[in-house]
Amino acid sequence: MAAGCWRLLSLVFILCEICSSLPVERHEKQQDDDDKCGYQSCHATKPAMLNVHLVPHTHDDVGWLKTVDQYFYGDRNDIQHAGVQYILDSVVEQLLKNPDRRFIYVETAFFYRWWRRQSADVRQTVKRLVNQGRLEFVNGGWCMSDEAATHYSAVLDQMTMGLRFLNQTFGPCGRPRVAWHIDPFGHAREHASMFAQMGYDGFFFGRVDYQDRYRRMLAKEQELLWRASDSLTPPMADLFTGILPNGYNPPEGFCWDQSCDDPPIKDDPDLEDYNVDDVVERFLNVANAQSLVYKSNHIIMTMGSDFQYENANLWYKNLDKLIRYVNARQSNGSRVNVLYSTPSCYLQELHRSNLTWALKTDDFFPYADDAHDFWTGYFSSRPALKRYERLSNSNLQTCNQLEVLGGGRASTSGPFGEGDSLALKRAMAVAQHHDAVSGTEKQHVANDYARRLADGWQRCQVVVSNSLAALSGSTAERVYCDSLNVSVCPITESSQRFSVNVFNPLARPVAWPVRLPVNGTAYSVSDADGRSVDCEVVSVSRATRDVRRNRGFAVNELLFRARAPALGFSTYSVSLLQDGPPPASVRSRAPKSIWNKYLRVTFDPETGLLSGLDNLETKQSISLTQNFYWYNASDGNNSKSKQPSGAYIFRPNSSTPFVISTTAKTETIQTSLTQEVRQQFAPWASQVVRLHTDSRVLELEWTVGPIPIHDDLGKEVITRLDTDVESSGIFYTDSNGREVLQRKKDFRPTWNLKQSEPVAGNYYPINSRAFIKDDKDQLTVVTDRSQGGGSIHNGSLEIMLHRRLLYDDVRGVAEALNETSDLFPDGLVVRGRLLLSLERPAIAADVHRPLAEEAVLQPLLTFTEGDLHPNTRLEFSGLQAALPPAVHLLTLSQWDDDSVLLRLEHQFQSWESKINSEPVTLDLQKLFSTLEVVGVSELNLSANQWKEEMKRFHWTSQTVEKPQKKTFKDPSAWEVTLHPMEIRTFLLRANFR
């Protein structure tokens, strides 16, 4: 075992020492000889019968109508009766009463809380239930993540956290075999790819488009093989996928929870209302009907729902009877066999059936549950929370990296006190829940998610400060300015001398435009080598002054371009030279054009709107008009379906949006560093068109809100880019920030769509980018958060920015999406950025891949007042050399005292770049400047299995060609090769240099 788990170029005694303290836990067998878990614990089935797998379960939202804490403790039952701690108490008690009973649990965030409060005796009892397969974990992440609005890096983190806890606590018997996403509102291809690479044998979900389901029922294709990557060699990203028959609810008439009204099984024949025969007949009818739309002689029934089993005795007493009485009919010729089961046991029987399965290569977006009910509104709901979650992810990755680079313990305990990344990790993990970053929770719950992120970042700031102190040699206090997007930073507004530390979390150097709120009119800026850096001072825009709401008093902004090395920092010194009024470099009329050496942007001088974009390098030119519009949200009263827009559903009253203004009032600012055209469309809608001197991209900084509702009309605000690109009704979006998928208007790859909503039915999630193209031109838009959008017209791309609605969409949240706050009682104001690039299609990915990477992981600025100590280290890189453009340093995180978790990612698809879609080889011993790597072992994607031990079920598709996995061998023990779209996960044994 030792020789296989670590590849070391060291002496044997060192090898043994390392393997004796492996950070990934290899548990000794803790169960009795008769105990079995996983596939070995499944009940026997009957080959000649229809086997009905009853799966007792609860679906416990990690926040939705109530906060996480309220759900766990059972607080605020006036909102919803739900208490997770009582569910787990009750289930454990009932499982002990009958060894045949089974239960599955999903949300590790709740289970972890419950586990910590249990006695040693209860813990031992639960371990025995797990070891015997009577209590089984499925999915296993900290939460059941959303699939539209989540970024893959955050999903990986939350899955790793949950699975690690299960692995540490229960060993191999705690490892889920099945991914289980029964409630998310559409399903992303990238999620399926990640689940496959995490080692799951199958994936089950509950929601699928009503037209898709109907076709699949007729064709018996509700169970399929999902090929979730066009770059990874099959079956690396192949995943068996099953669509559950009733969402995740029991069949109608068979719900025996305390929250249900269905009658119990009354089996005393002396009673007048004895109903065993009726229950059995109804159940046999349901089972036989379900068997007609599935392929094998095994079917699954989910016996549970939201927050059920708080009184588990009700469920289990009736399920025991149901199994006994239905199976008793076999003596009279019935061919139905009912059993307690789990998703993995059901999956095993499907695998044993040796059938072939339909192949799917696209995704399951958008999702509609009726003709006018498209769940595409949540792609954009709560845009401020979506941005805060994305920014928090960037902060967390920086915190993780600096904890490692700063020396582990020296980072968590240092001159600035005790800190850790755990609170932010947990807050980010909870925020991935499908009613969190999705924006589909009640307002007080959204506030709670944001508070958790803020509290976690406070703890991480201590880690960052300690790490930077260790790396720079300076213990000067560091200040964090979290409101720079609205030009608020007290230290830069009031200090005459200060320094700016720019930490770059990317594995390549970056140049970043810094904008700092100041009150002087002239400053000097010097870099780490003491060289003067070009800087300019411009006035704060009117939109920024309005949105600050008296939080800052800066009248100007200081601009300079900072450069930071790969995975490192550079420090800039700033000194005030002149105080005075704001500079008068503003021109009120729109220019005909602004340009740098890469791009030219043209405007219509009459309207002040964009009119064209030219790439001067490639000699491309397109017409480009851009404006802001709003769709009138349906209130449900003027349509046959009575379906209003809400947190989940996008339902415009008309396919034609209202333009906010056909003209824009403009101000133009031109400096040596940047050119800005500030556009005002309405008191509540403005934009800055910004072109930096050395940039190949155009920045559109939009500000929307408070959206007016004095006319009693809910509004869904979009920006639309109209071009002469011949896109032919096709556009492209990313899947969770990774692989790009083609979208076509009024079309679905796997069924003949009957389009009933020409706008909402053509909206898709945009996690980090979208583009349109023809043979000559590709216009790519990179976003700073997850948003919804579509290409409703040829050559057009629209993105929804903000929503303010007056009605609930009747999907459970029971609250209109009408966001206000103490600071914005008249309605939320949201600000964001879109980055536009115009390139030839063949090379466009070489621009948008690193651009999106930079938008997700942006530099962190920290500030120190006064002059730095002369011995302060002003520049640092954690890498010996920058990584190649195709490689992204996805994860660098402390695993334990002397081990580090590392994920390296090839961020290009196999077809999108002539330069960067090639394999790349790296030497792990030559990566880091502060770490001496003395051991390495490869893990699966979720870091809960050794890669060499990960074995998955093989499934056969109905296609003629059987997929074969290519085997690639690394050049040496230390050199690893990454192929397009491949992520490789390593555990490094490292010494701090």
Image: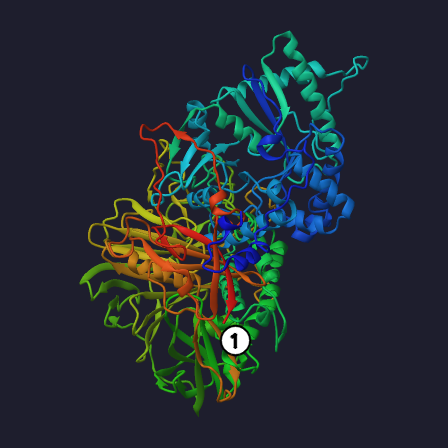
Classify mark 1: helix, strand or loop. helix
Q: Residue furthest bottom?
A: 578
The x and y percentages for residue 55 are: 62, 31
Q: In this picture, is 119 found above or below 697?
A: above
Of residues 124 and 160, the one nearer the viewer is 124
Q: Which residue is at the far right?
A: 270
State the image quarter where residue 667 is shown: bottom left
The answer to whether residue 889 shows anywhere in this view is yes
Circle 1 Cα neighbour tier, 10 Å, few/some/many (<14 / 14–19 / ≥20)? many
* Total numbered circles: 1
Considering every residue shown, the one lying at the far top of the view is: 332
Q: Is residue 858 left or right of residue 662?
A: right
Question: Relative to residue 554, is residue 926 drawn left or right?
Answer: left
- Residue that carries the numbered disc 1 in the rendered image: 468
Task: Please identify the quarter of the rendering in which residue 676 is found.
Answer: bottom left
Residue most toward the front? 12
Residue at 73% x, 38% y: name it: 92
Residue 706, x across and y down, in percent = 50, 62
* 300 or 29: nearer the viewer: 29
Q: Nearer the viewer, residue 24 or 462?
A: 24
Inspect the image, locate mark 1, and give the three-letter code of the amino acid beneath it: Leu
Q: Is residue 335 above or below residue 393?
A: above
Residue 569 spot, x, y in % from top left? 44, 74
Q: Is residue 87 visible?
A: no
From the viewer's side, name the closer residue of 537 and 992: 992
The image position of residue 523, as x and y in percent, is: 41, 87
Q: Is residue 693 toward the left or the right of residue 81 in the image?
A: left
Compared to residue 874, the image places residue 317 above or below, namely above
Its colouring scheme is: rainbow
Q: Residue at x 65, y 9 (%)?
A: 331
